[in-house]
Amino acid sequence: MDFKKRIIIIIVCLLLLVVLLLLFVIYKGKNKTGDVEEVPVDLYNSYFDERERQGITENDAVAQEEDNANEYFTVEAIIKSFNTNVNYLGSSAKNLNLFVTKDNEQRILNEYKERGYKYINNVLASSYKTTYSVNNDYIYNAVKNNIGKKYTITDMYAVDDSAYINTYFVYGNYEGNEFNFVVVLDRYNYTYEIYLNNFLKDREISKNNLNSMKTLNIKHVESNENNTFQYKNIEEGQLVKMYYEEYMDLIKNDVNKAYSLVNEEYKQKRKLSSIDDFKACISDRAEDYSYRGLETYSVTKCDGYTEIVCTDVSGSRTIFRLKGISNYTTILDSYTMSIKAIDEEYNNADSTKKAALCLNTFIECLNNKDYEAAYNYLNKSFRENNFKNVEEFKKYANNLWFNVNEYVYDSAKVQNGDYIFSGEMSNKEFFEGTDSQSISQSFVVKSGTTVRNFELSFEVYDK
């Protein structure tokens, strides 16, 4: 191709490019003039306007115990951050886990102290700071007794002031010394502000009086470098695992606290009237719980509470009844009192499954070392002919069966309304390097109206 033809081709290409650019500009211009300009919707204030038209005021909002895990742990994280900065005001380099030379220690501690004061000033509510003439000396005197101490939330209540403002009344203590907070979240701006313990005292705000927890009529919270937050996203399984592991730790390391959390109705029905009764009840569990890890769980909404049923690898159950995230009681088995999830499973089962569920209840009694409950499930005639009392049955069970039992049946036959299960009872405490243990065992089960209403007998070997 000669030089002139190349020049012509280049010129044509450039002309085509110019034409395309002109067409694009014309199209954009027409499209712009044809569009209707979008006016941003002020969702923040429109909510208040709608409430005003309906005659609803912020004061109509009623405090409720916080039962939303994401909300609860979002506020908890804010309190933790606050307490971290409180510690900056007076802790040593060692307590703050700082590795510094002696020459630099004081300078660095002063830097941390200034950081703490700045943070606390930034997160305290403007109205609080105005009311109490807040300065660094005020802040130090307000929190000095809490420096270096762990804060425990005991109760949290929420008032939904509006679509975007939530007010949280947080009750708790620094290692036994009561100290409470109010935390206001602005969910529109993702900002927050804090009110300290004296604010609640001066206004006589008490967890014993829900009506005292009223909205503070906050419309928005201005942002600064320290008062923004991100919502926590707690999955259901994480929450269940937290409850289970924390309570297992209490059983092993703080039995008094563990006992204080036991459901009162359960205490009466299980005859746990004293801490000694409770210790006897959980003595075997306290040793075994390092092995008895959480295997499955279910979560059921009930009237006024949420019920979490945790089943460990031995088949034993621990139930948590939650009225709020930090307000719960525990039940240590599924047979002493009615458990909604267990009852629903039984009611929806066919007759064979119902009998199998009753047999599982008997195995759970054995694994809990609750020989009295297991004994009471035995058929009366069978009991009288083989075990005159609970002690005889306990001796037989300990000699023949295992510390942690698992029963797997091969067949289930119906005879005169009773279910005959044939299978093997095996040792669930089988560890690698040991020989598994099992024995053939048959059971006869006559189920009733609930999983706690049945009678049972079994093939008895020489005692």
Image: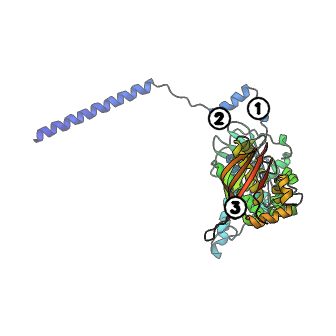
Task: Work out which residue is located at the far top of the displayed protein and give it.
Answer: 34
Give the position of the C terminus as an image quadrant.
Answer: bottom right
Q: How far apart are marks 2 and 3 (CA)?
A: 50 Å
Mark 2 closeness class: few <14, some 14–19, many ≥20 residues within 10 Å = some
Which SS class for mark 3?
loop
Q: What residue type is labelled 3?
A: Arg
Q: Quadrant of residue 243?
A: bottom right
Q: Quadrant of residue 58?
A: top right
Give the position of the N terminus as an image quadrant.
Answer: top left
Which SS class for mark 1?
loop
Which SS class for mark 2?
helix
Residue 74 in the image: above or below residue 34? below
Q: How far apart are marks 2 and 1 (CA)?
A: 15 Å
Where is mark 2, residue-wise? 44
Q: Which amino acid does label 2 sit on?
A: Tyr
Write the residue at 85% across / 58% down: 385
Residue 191: image x %, image y %?
A: 65, 46
Where is mark 1, residue-wise? 57
Mark 3 closeness class: few <14, some 14–19, many ≥20 residues within 10 Å = some
> Which mark is first along the chain, 1 or 3?
1
Write the residue at 83% across / 47% down: 207
Q: Which of 139 and 150 is in front in this view?
A: 150
> Which mark is first along the chain, 3 or 2?
2
Residue 389 numbered mark, or none: none
Where is mark 3, residue-wise? 292
Q: Left or right: where does residue 99 sit relative to residue 416?
A: left
Residue 90 seen from this side:
no
Q: Nearer the viewer, residue 428 or 292?
A: 428
